[in-house]
Image (cartoon, helix red, strand yellow):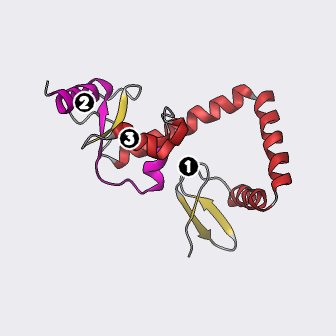
Amino acid sequence: MKIIRCHLCWDGFYTKGHNTKYCLGCRKRAYSLLTVNSTRKRCEDDPEYHAYKLNYHREYIKKNRGKAAKWSREATKRRKLKVFKAYGGTKCVLCNNDDLDVLTIDHINCGGTKHREEIAGKRKYDGQAIYRWLVENDYPDGFRVLCRNCNWKEHLRLNFGE
C-alpha cells in the first residue's frame, strides 16, 4: 500500500476499500487530491496549460480574497501546530509559555538565519518556510519550541555571552 503526501496538510493518505482514498490529516476525499496532483503533472508537461491555470488561480484569488486569506491562515495554523506537537507540544521549553501567537521554532545549535536563507532562497523572510521544511523532512533533530522572548535570550547568550 503506497502512502502519498497530501498537498493540503502534508500528511500521508492511503487506499481504503475499493479505490477510496482519504487524507489522514484533513479527511478530504482523494478525488480532489488526485485531481490536483494530475493538474500539477499536466502543468509540468504543458507550459501553455500552466500559464492558463496560473491566470485562472490569480483571478480566483482576486475575486475571493477573504476566502483565500482565511484558508491560508487556517492551513498555516494547522501546520504550525503539527510541527509544535512533533517537537514536544505547544509550550516553550524554557518558560512554559503556551500562547501560540508567540511560540516559534528554535535551531538548538544556532544557524537559523543561514538555514532559512538556504531553504527559502530570495524569500528568506517567509515565516512558514521553516515549518514546511520541517514537515517535508520528517521533523529532523536540532530544533525545539521556544517563545520569542526565550529565543531572543538564547540568541544573545550564545552569540554575545550575555
Q: Residues within 10 Å of mark 1 (few under 14, many from 20)?
A: some
Residue 84, quarter of picture:
top left
In the picture, measured across the screen, residue 137 lies left or right of residue 49, that is left
Residue 9: assigned label: 1
Which of the two discs, 3 and 1, sits closer to the camera? Answer: 3
> Residue 149 lies in magenta, yes or no?
yes
Q: Residues within 10 Å of mark 2 (few under 14, many from 20)?
A: some
User: Residue at the location (36% across, 33% down)?
Assistant: 104
Q: Quadrant of the C terminus?
A: top left
How far is mark 3 from mark 1, CA to CA? 26 Å
Labels 2 and 1: the sequence-earlier one:
1
SS type, badge 3: helix
Magenta: main secondary structure equals: helix
- Please state which of residues 150 and 46 is positioned toward the viewer in this rendering: 46
Residue 130 visible, this angle: no
Residue 114: assigned label: 3
- Please state which of residues 124 and 69 is positioned toward the viewer in this rendering: 124
Which of the two discs, 2 and 1, sits closer to the camera? Answer: 2
User: Residue at the location (55% across, 68% down)?
Assistant: 3
